[in-house]
Amino acid sequence: MLWSTSLIDQLGEELAPWQRAAYGHFSAAMCDEEKPYPCVPGKQGFQTDTLRFGFADDPRKQAASEKLACLLKQYGEISRDTGKYASLVVFFNSEGIGAENQSIDSYQDIFWGLLNRIHELDESPWPEDIAKDPHHHTWEFCFDGEPYFAFCATPAHTVRKSRHFPYFLVAFQPRWVFDEINSSTAFGQKLKKVIRKRLIEYDEAEPHPSLKWYGQEDNYEWKQYYLSDDDSSLSKCPFLNMHKKIKS
């Protein structure tokens, strides 16, 4: 089931305690005006009831992968009707993971394992205009024919506060959201400067070197999905071998 902010306001008592807690943390971050969240489109999406939310179990479990696949399929059918700053934010019940004191690297494995499993559940062909190789600058994660920018936040992140969240969180932004937010538009260039300034203030650190524009020949989207607390990044995409299985 997909939830909106207005629906949670009406029926939030139906949510489990951990679900209410996860959404409460997210809402507090989006509403904080003293330390504004750096992603302007995400913040505006929350304020305009454009975002959609989903909840799933432990992200290491197959049941969570199946739930996420269902949420993404449902979301892809309605995302264009929600508003121009659309995103799907999925909270996972990671209380058990947190109790095990997982590291940033182990959460990274959990994230890519999750994306690989839901790709295996995808019954639609890979979009013809999206590269199948993650090491190509036009690659983007796709599900049910829709390209998405994926964003992961975890309890283990401490330096990059914009990537910290008390629960394991994955957000999916449809690629069409960026049609007017890119390096070729004045609006995109201006917005990037605002976001970078806010990001430095929020994280109290310089932006990760992997943060670049989609389509740049030296940019790889997968490196932006999951950022480390330092400036390092993986040399090979964990989705790399999956493109060989992608349906043509």
Image (tube, rainbow, N blue to C red):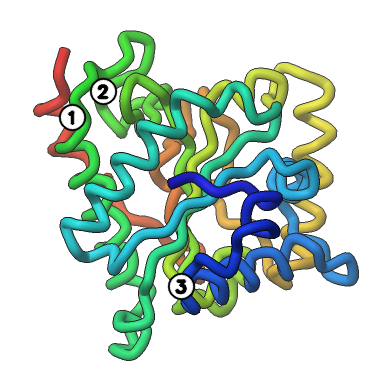
The image's mark for residue 48 is none
Callout 3 amino acid: Ala
Q: Earlier in the sequence, mark 1 or mark 3?
A: 3
What residue is drawn where x is 67% and y is 52%? 5
**Alpha-carbon neighbours of circle 1 within 10 Å: few (<14), some, or many (≥20)?**
some
Whole-number angstrom distance, CA of label 2 to CA of label 1:
5 Å
Q: Name the residue under label 2.
A: 132
**Alpha-carbon neighbours of circle 3 within 10 Å: few (<14), some, or many (≥20)?**
few
Is residue 224 in view?
A: no
Q: Which of marks 2 and 3 is nearer the N terminus?
A: 3
Q: Nearer the viewer, residue 171 or 160?
A: 171
Which residue is the extreme one toward the top? 128
Q: Name the residue under label 1.
A: 243
Mark 3, secondary structure of its residue: loop
- Quadrant location, the C terminus: top left
Q: Which of 10 and 61 is in front in this view?
A: 10
Q: Nearer the viewer, residue 2 or 201?
A: 2
Counting from the top left corner in percent of width and height, residue 225 is at: 44, 49
Whole-number angstrom distance, CA of label 2 to CA of label 3:
38 Å
Q: Name the residue under label 3.
A: 16
